[in-house]
Image: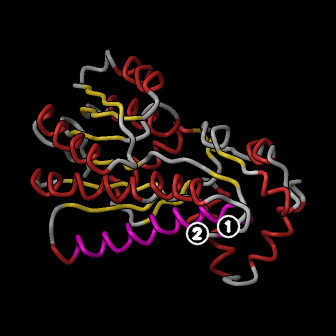
Amino acid sequence: MKNFTDKVAAITGAGSGMGRSLAVLLAKRGCHLALSDVNEAGLAETVRLVADSGVKVTSQRLDVANKDDVFAWADKVVADHGKVNLIFNNAGVALGSSVDGGSYEDFEWVMNINFWGVVHGTKAFLPYLKQAGEGHIINTSSLFGLIAVPSQSAYNASKFAVRGFTEALRQELELEKVNVSATSVHPGGIKTNIAKAARMDKSVENLGMSVNSTDKFEKLFRTTADDAAAQMIRAVEKNQRRLLIGNDAKVLDLMARILPSSYQKLVALSTKTMK
């Protein structure tokens, strides 16, 4: 997809961060928008930012963990816009906890949004993308879909799952020879609200970490949401299979390739220095 003019993009997690930046940049490219987020105030602000862009914009409060609601939203997007060409499954949450001490409820919360939200969005929109004759699915995994980190077992599980799901999907679409593709996106540290909004369980203290450790990690984040969104749009244009965003993602991906087992010792050691 080289031209976004008069295309229709559906974006989850559009109320802040990369989702909001995607909406603004795509609107400038003449792409109509169907925006969703569980945060109604944030979603309304994104709608305001693109209101004078000259493209059609619709919005919907949406919890991506609810399968029926996601499918209903997909139907509504096509009813409102006549078609849909892109789905950015971007909504996500974060959790810090140990495997032993973390609760099932928190684990399910992360998986329901980060993984099942991607599955729901993909399955709800894929038939419509095929129907449109030109489409792309962009699923947000993470740097933590490439390497594992102490205290991030649930988040790692969800993002590794998104990676595997999307890579398998891409191959299936190619075998079917339909004009629809898929990209797995792996951002490193992005300056968004996800770290601030993360749930931190006291069980991380058993790992020698602090429930306030996200503040220290945030200081390492270098890539802006606008830059990340621009790279995602370019990845669609280039039909990339995988997109690594940020030098941290690129370096740590390389480390995991060179040291597929022993990288864990290096990560654990660096985690200790972040106490």
Q: Is residue 25 left or right of residue 104?
A: left
Please tell me which of labels 2 and 1 falls first in the chain: 2
- Mark 2 — residue? 146
Classify mark 2: helix, strand or loop. Answer: loop
**Side (left or right) of 158 relative to 71:** right
Would you say residue 163 sits in the magenta stretch?
Answer: yes
Q: Is 74 left or right of 108, judged from the image as shown?
A: left
- State how far apart marks 2 and 1 are (Cα): 8 Å
Instruction: Look at the magenta stretch and give its main secondary structure.
Output: helix
Q: Position of residue 181 (x, y in %)?
A: 27, 62
Q: Residue at x 78, y 69 (%)?
A: 267
Q: How was the colour assigned to the protein in this rendering?
A: secondary structure
Q: Residue at point 34% right, 29% down?
A: 28
Q: Which residue is mark 1?
A: 252
Q: Which mark is residue 41?
A: none
Q: Which residues are magenta?
A: 148-174
Q: Residue at x 43, y 25 (%)?
A: 40
Say what amino acid the circle numbered 1 marks. Answer: Leu
Mark 2–mark 1 CB contact (< 8 Å): yes
